[in-house]
Structures are given as C-alpha cells and as structure tokens.
Image (tube, helix red, strand yellow):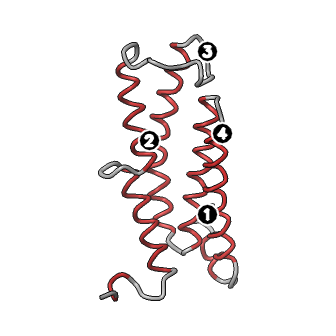
C-alpha cells in the first residue's frame, strides 16, 4: 500500500523519515520477540512481522521497486517455510512446541531440506533469493544515509 501511494509520501518532508524509522523498529522488535517464542508457528509469524518491517524500510528511502522485489522473494521462501512447518506439525500429531520437537531429519528428509533452504533464504545467505533482496536494501540505505558514497571513497 505504501508503494502504491508513493506520491502521497514523497511530498510531506518528514513522512519518509517516519516510514524509515517505523520499518526499522518493527523489524528489530518483531525479530527479538521471535527469539523468545517456543511455538513453531509463532516464531514464523513474528519472523514475518520482522520481514514486513524490512519491506517498509526501503519505502522510507524512496526505493519502492526494491520493496516489491523483496515482497516477491519473501512470498516464495516464507510459503515454503510455512508448508514445511505444517508438515512437521502434522508429523508430530499437532505438536507445536519446539522444545518437544527434534531429531526429525531422518524421519522427514524432504521437509528437512526444504525448511533448510527456506531458512537460508530467510537469513539472507549468499546466493539465495533473500540475500539479493536484503543486500540491495542495505546498500541503498548505506548510500542514502552516508556523507560519502562508496564510489567516492579512496
């Protein structure tokens, strides 16, 4: 919605600063909340909230196309992560407490590989889709909010 209404956000002088701050704080607080959860679906849900904050952040630096790129990448690896989590929950007879779930790599090898691949993409591991979208966001933020851009350094 922010990307679609981008002309409305470009004119007020402080709107983009507020959007940038809200996106960064949302990403940080949702990620730290996810660390403290034990329920498998809640961890993934808070991770999604953190990723949504990460998607709002490039809108605040007027790079709306990066937001859409990250949204598309996020849709695919998060869908794979939720499907894998559902497979684990079903295999464990609706048990969602991660403290009681473990050692399933030999029981669910395909699910293990799919969850591993989607987790790598979620954390931004190199050569995964999440790496490219997160790397572009960080590079654009770095060049926008530094006095000397990387091309002008010695």
Read off the residue under disc 1. 24
The CA distance from mark 3 to mark 2 is 23 Å
The 10 Å Cα crowd at callout 2, few under 14, some 14 to 19, many 20 or more, is: many
Residue 36 is tagged as: 4
Residue at the limit of the structure toward the top, as seen here: 93
Residue 47 visible in the snapshot: yes
Residue at mark 2: 77
Left/right of residue 115 with respect to residue 95 in the rendered view = left
How many angstroms separate mark 4 from mark 2 (CA)?
A: 22 Å
Q: Which residue is mark 3?
A: 94
Q: Considering the numbered disc 3 on the image, is that residue within a helix, a strand or a loop?
A: loop
Q: Earlier in the sequence, mark 3 or mark 1?
A: 1
Front of the two marks 4 and 3: 4
Q: Is residue 8 visible?
A: no
Report x, y in % for residue 97. 63, 23
Q: Residue 133's spot in the image, x, y percent?
A: 41, 58
Residue sitting at x 60%, y 49%: 31
Secondary structure found at label 1: helix
Few, some or many C-alpha atoms within 10 Å of disc 3 (few <14, some 14-19, many ≥20)? few
**Mark 4 touches mark 3? (CB < 8 Å):** no
At which x and y percent is residue 119? 43, 39
Q: Nearer the viewer, mark 1 or mark 4?
A: 4
Q: Between disc 2 and disc 1, whose residue precedes?
A: 1
Give the quadrant of the C terminus: bottom left
Nearer to the camera, 35 or 134: 35
Residue 145: percent from the left, percent from the top?
Answer: 52, 80
Question: Element under label 2?
Answer: helix
Relative placement, left or right, of 147 versus 24 is left
Precedes in sequence: disc 4 or disc 3: 4
Q: Residue at x 48, y 34 (%)?
A: 81
The mark closer to the camera, 2 or 1, is 1
């Amino acid at each position: 919605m922010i990307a679609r209404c981008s002309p409305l956000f470009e004119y007020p002088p402080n709107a983009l600063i507020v959007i940038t701050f809200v996106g960064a704080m949302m990403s940080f607080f949702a990620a730290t909340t996810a660390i403290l959860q034990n329920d498998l679906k809640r961890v993934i849900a808070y991770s999604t909230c953190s990723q949504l904050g990460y998607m709002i952040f490039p809108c605040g630096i007027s790079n709306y196309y990066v937001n859409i790129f990250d949204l598309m990448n996020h849709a695919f690896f998060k869908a794979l992560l939720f499907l894998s989590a559902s497979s684990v929950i079903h295999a464990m007879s609706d048990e969602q407490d991660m403290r009681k779930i473990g050692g399933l790599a030999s029981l669910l090898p395909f699910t293990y590989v799919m969850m591993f691949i989607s987790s790598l993409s979620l954390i931004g591991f190199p050569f995964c889709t999440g790496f490219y979208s997160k790397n572009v966001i960080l590079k654009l933020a770095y060049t926008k909010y530094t006095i000397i851009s990387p091309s002008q350094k010695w």
